[in-house]
């Protein structure tokens, strides 16, 4: 038997992070078993289904790396097939027409509620002759559900789950206007798509009993069910908007890598020993749906962020440059030049050591590709701080030092010069480098200045020192030649 799983979202909004994990579990199990992973868009709710949501779902799945097999199936387009299945049950006596009006059904529910009874359809038209039908009422079609015994689901995650058939009423298959219900559509689509394993959130477990009854009425083999616990927030409640961002696009736009999110989500409710970093190949080889925990998992954004930082450090420098270029170009007045890209690529081994998201990476990378135009107030204060080395003098001494005898100075050589110079001038090394950092980046915190200087090169460093002198209006201001072009008469 070829294993076939499916992800079946409703296109009524964003792609929920819980839905992404459900899709991931379906994908991994199908690949683990050498089977197929299908996508079905359950768009039968025409008022709430929107094209933008469909686009968000497909783009989100592609971004996170869950490519489905074949073409997506759209449920609404299969309405005729759903109706045919209901009519077959009607012809076989396994379903019947119900002429109860909305008003009658409302009164029935109110009476049951008042008596403290379970709210359920009372079967009033189950064995009644259609000749008693009131005029002008368009009947719905209901399935004749078994009234005795039990329905048992041998769930791969939850274990055996049983419900007494007396608790389940005759569900509607076709509404009075002829439109199929969700329950009918899901069952018929699963049958026609050859779904062997239904892996979904445990909030669908109650639906499974009715769906299993319908599958049996249609004379088809039942799939194996696996109802996975929902994801909870840090407070233990079901993950929702009040916990913050729950749509996958948020994590994409905030600089999370898809492989990091995949790794994090697969460990929400499933694990492989003490392994924290799990590659795609390992996930496919190790994942089995029967190993999913029954208890709900808690989403921890801090753990995801930490894991994302690990994946950033392991990513290639060129890939990271390519990923942050759009953001950098949006922050700068013009697209990056070839020289700026070269600086960025050379700086990436150092930059990626500290960044936990692509947003952080782009922010720190900005200092490499453009001279600062806005200085932090504390950074400017460092340039003229009492007791600090006169900035104009120290930068001039540095740019004329033997450090630059090498075309690309070594970070260790720069550090050795700085230590010796600080000792000679009687200043702290941290204060001296704090001034250099402020001049080069406009900030008080950045990657290592010792690594930054060789990447930028002498001319760019000199230009940035002069830029900082101009910005600070230092009392010891001097022009460091030959940074600024000399004015000519005329």
Image (cartoon, grey):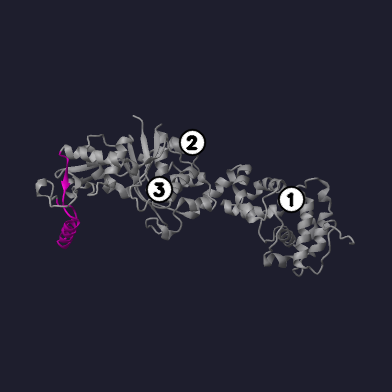
Q: Which residue is mark 2?
A: 281
Q: Which residue is more in the foreground, 195 or 103?
A: 103
CA gap, disc 1 and disc 3: 45 Å
Please say whether residue 118 is one of the residues in the magenta stretch.
yes
Q: From the image, which quarter does the C terminus lie in?
A: bottom right
Q: Which residue is mark 1?
A: 456
How would you rate the neighbour count of disc 2 (Cα within 10 Å): few for under 14, some for 14-19, many for 20 or more? few
| Residue 201 higher or lower than 373, as above or below | above
Provide residue 79's location: percent of width, then percent of height: 30, 42
CA gap, disc 2 and disc 1: 39 Å
Q: Residue at the location (39% across, 49% down)?
A: 11
Q: Is residue 427 visible?
A: no
149 on left or right of 419: left
- For this orientation, the residue located farthest to the front is 136
Q: Secondary structure at mark 1?
A: helix
Provide residue 211's location: percent of width, then percent of height: 25, 43
Provide residue 222's location: percent of width, then percent of height: 27, 36
> How many numbered marks, from 0 up?
3
CA gap, disc 3 and disc 2: 22 Å
> Which residues make up the magenta segment?
93-122
Q: Residue at the location (52% across, 49% down)?
A: 307
Residue 19 badge: 3
Q: Secondary structure at mark 2?
A: helix
Provide residue 72's location: percent of width, then percent of height: 40, 39
Residue 220 badge: none
Q: From the image, which quarter does the N terminus lie in?
A: top left
Sequence-wise, the earlier of marks 2 and 1 is 2
Q: Secondary structure at mark 3?
A: helix
The answer to which quarter of the image holds residue 374 is bottom right
259 on left or right of 47: right
The nearer-to-camera label among 3 and 2 is 3
């Amino acid at each position: 038997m070829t294993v076939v799983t499916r992800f079946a979202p409703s296109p009524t909004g964003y792609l929920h992070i819980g839905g992404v994990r459900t899709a991931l579990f379906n994908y991994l199990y199908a690949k683990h078993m050498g089977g197929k992973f299908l996508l079905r868009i359950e768009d039968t709710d025409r008022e709430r289904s929107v094209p933008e949501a469909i686009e968000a779902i497909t783009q989100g799945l592609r971004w996170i790396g869950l490519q489905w097999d074949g073409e997506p199936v759209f449920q609404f387009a299969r309405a005729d097939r759903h109706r045919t299945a209901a009519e077959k049950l009607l012809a076989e006596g396994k379903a019947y027409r119900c002429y109860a009006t909305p008003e009658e059904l409302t009164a029935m529910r109110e009476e049951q509620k008042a008596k403290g009874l379970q709210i359920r359809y009372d079967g009033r038209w189950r064995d009644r002759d259609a000749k008693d039908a009131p005029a002008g009422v368009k009947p719905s079609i209901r399935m004749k559900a078994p009234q005795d015994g039990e329905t048992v689901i041998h769930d791969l995650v939850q274990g055996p789950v049983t419900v007494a058939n007396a608790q389940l009423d005759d569900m509607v298959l076709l509404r009075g206007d002829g439109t199929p219900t969700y329950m009918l559509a899901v069952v018929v689509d699963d049958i026609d798509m050859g779904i062997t394993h239904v892996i979904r959130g445990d909030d669908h477990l109650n639906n499974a009993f009715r769906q299993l009854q319908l599958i049996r009425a249609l004379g088809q083999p039942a799939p194996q069910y696996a109802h996975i616990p929902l994801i909870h927030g840090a407070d233990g409640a079901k993950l929702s908007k009040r916990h913050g961002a729950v749509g996958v696009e948020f994590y994409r736009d905030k600089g999370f890598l898809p492989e990091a999110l995949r790794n994090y989500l697969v460990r929400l409710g499933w694990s492989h020993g003490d392994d924290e970093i799990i590659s795609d190949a390992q996930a496919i080889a190790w994942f089995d749906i029967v190993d999913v925990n029954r208890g709900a998992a808690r989403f921890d954004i801090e753990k995801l962020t930490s894991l994302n930082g690990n994946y950033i450090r392991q990513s290639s420098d060129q890939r990271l440059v390519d990923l942050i270029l759009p953001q950098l170009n949006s922050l700068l007045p013009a697209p990056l030049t070839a020289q700026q890209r070269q600086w960025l690529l050379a700086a990436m081994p150092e930059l990626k050591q500290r960044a936990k998201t692509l947003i952080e990476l782009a922010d720190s990378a900005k200092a490499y590709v453009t001279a600062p135009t806005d200085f932090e107030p504390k950074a400017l204060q460092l340039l003229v701080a009492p007791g600090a080395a006169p900035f104009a003098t120290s930068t001039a001494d540095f740019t004329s030092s033997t450090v630059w005898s090498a075309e690309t100075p070594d970070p260790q050589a720069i550090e050795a010069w700085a230590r010796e110079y600080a000792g000679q001038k009687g200043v702290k090394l941290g204060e001296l480098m704090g001034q250099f950092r402020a001049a080069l980046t406009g900030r008080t915190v950045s990657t290592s200045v010792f690594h930054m200087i060789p990447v930028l090169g002498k001319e760019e460093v000199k230009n940035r020192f002069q830029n900082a002198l101009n910005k600070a209006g230092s009392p010891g201001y001097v022009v460091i030649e030959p940074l600024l072009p000399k004015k000519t008469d005329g």
